[in-house]
């Protein structure tokens, strides 16, 4: 069954919970917590290898009629795992990986990962790693990706919450002082050839995300997850209103559909697609706009030079 007949779906936000991801959680918890123990507590499957996880995602995308997905290495520096997935399924998967620009050698590792075709960019979590996007370490990385076509930089802004860490009793010392989308304006203007993606419509800082996107034509918004941040906003804000306002300010060419799918056995979260399609239909979005958001825009970023 396809996600939507007649629409080529490119998912801009799929987490790749590799064996390295589970090893990292085990190390953070310390003995006697094993990967199997963690999976049991979360109700998740532990993949045997990155190869088997990549194959499982392809089966899942096929089952739901999704043409391509951007997989995100959700363990710091794990370009290898997603690189395996992309090498195995280059026509179906692209990848970015979580990177901390403040760590020594981050720039050299990024250069190697891109040159070896493991990744198409990177994902920044300033609130998690406590730095400003304007930092010169970030600019060093942007200088690298700016020389490669079809590369993308994700910058998580707004609220950052990881429910699995709470379930496991792991701390989440995220500092929202580093999460303002407006911090992105200066670097986005300085690197106009680099597409920057703000996930989750700004994750609670929707107004600020719209402001920076209006000022910077290379800033995109992804639509991923349930967008539960809407409950924090004043007034009656719902998904229809969010899409209407985003289309009004940003336009149809800089919105990227994302499901925020992550773990198995849940797999690809079709409900997110259906809710977003219903919202766009309810506001009368033209079919051309729907096609752009659900696939055309990401296709252009990844595949068109």
Image (tube, helix red, strand yellow):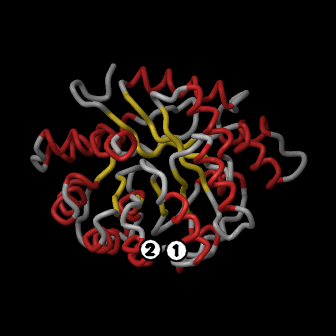
Residue 90 position (above or below residue 143): above
* Badge 1 or badge 2: first in the primary sequence: 1
Relative depth, front residue between 50 and 152: 152
Q: Of discs 1 and 2, which sits in the foreground?
A: 2
**Relative to 160, 45 lies left or right:** right
Relative depth, front residue between 107 and 59: 107
**Going by the picture, which residue comes out furthest to the right?**
31
Residue at figure coordinates x 62%, y 29% from the top left: 53
Residue at figure coordinates x 56%, y 33% from the top left: 86
Q: Quadrant of residue 105?
A: bottom right
Are there few (<14), some (14-19), or many (20+) residues within 10 Å of tag 2? some
Residue 144 position (above or below residue 134): above
Residue 133 marker: 1
Residue 67: % across, % down: 37, 28
Q: Are marks 1 and 2 in contact (CB under 8 Å)?
A: yes
Q: Which residue is mark 2?
A: 187
Residue 79: % across, % down: 65, 46
Local SS, label 1: loop
Quadrant where the image shows the N terminus? top left
Residue at figure coordinates x 33%, y 39% from the top left: 273
Residue 27: % across, % down: 82, 51
Residue 53 position (above or below residue 98): above
Residue at figure coordinates x 67%, y 50% from the top left: 75
């Amino acid at each position: 069954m396809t996600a939507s007949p007649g629409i080529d779906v490119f998912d801009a936000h799929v987490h790749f919970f590799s064996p390295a991801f589970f090893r990292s959680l085990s190390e953070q918890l310390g003995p006697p917590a094993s990967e199997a123990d963690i999976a049991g507590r979360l109700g998740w499957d532990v993949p045997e290898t990155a190869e088997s996880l990549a194959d499982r995602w392809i089966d899942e995308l096929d089952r739901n009629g999704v043409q391509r997905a951007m997989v995100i290495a959700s363990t710091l520096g794990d370009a290898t795992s997603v690189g395996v997935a992309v090498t195995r399924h280059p026509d179906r998967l692209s990848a970015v990986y979580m990177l901390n620009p403040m760590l020594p050698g981050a720039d050299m590792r990024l250069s190697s990962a891109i040159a070896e075709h493991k990744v198409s960019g990177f994902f920044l979590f300033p609130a998690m790693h406590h730095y400003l996007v304007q930092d010169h370490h970030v600019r060093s990385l942007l200088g690298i990706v700016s020389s490669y076509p079809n590369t993308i930089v994700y910058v998580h802004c707004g609220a950052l919450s990881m429910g699995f860490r709470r379930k496991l009793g792991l701390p989440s010392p995220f500092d929202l002082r580093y999460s303002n989308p407006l911090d992105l304006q200066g670097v986005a203007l300085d690197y106009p050839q680099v597409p920057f993606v703000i996930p989750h419509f700004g994750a609670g800082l929707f107004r600020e995300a719209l402001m920076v996107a209006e000022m910077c034509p290379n800033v995109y918004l992804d639509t991923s997850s349930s967008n539960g941040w809407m409950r924090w906003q004043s007034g009656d804000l719902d998904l229809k209103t969010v899409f209407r306002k985003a289309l009004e300010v940003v336009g149809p060419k800089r919105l990227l559909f994302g499901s925020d799918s992550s773990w198995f056995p849940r797999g690809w979260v079709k409900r997110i697609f259906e809710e977003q399609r219903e919202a766009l239909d309810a506001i009368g979005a033209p079919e051309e706009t729907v096609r752009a958001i659900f696939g055309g825009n990401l296709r252009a970023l990844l595949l068109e030079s």
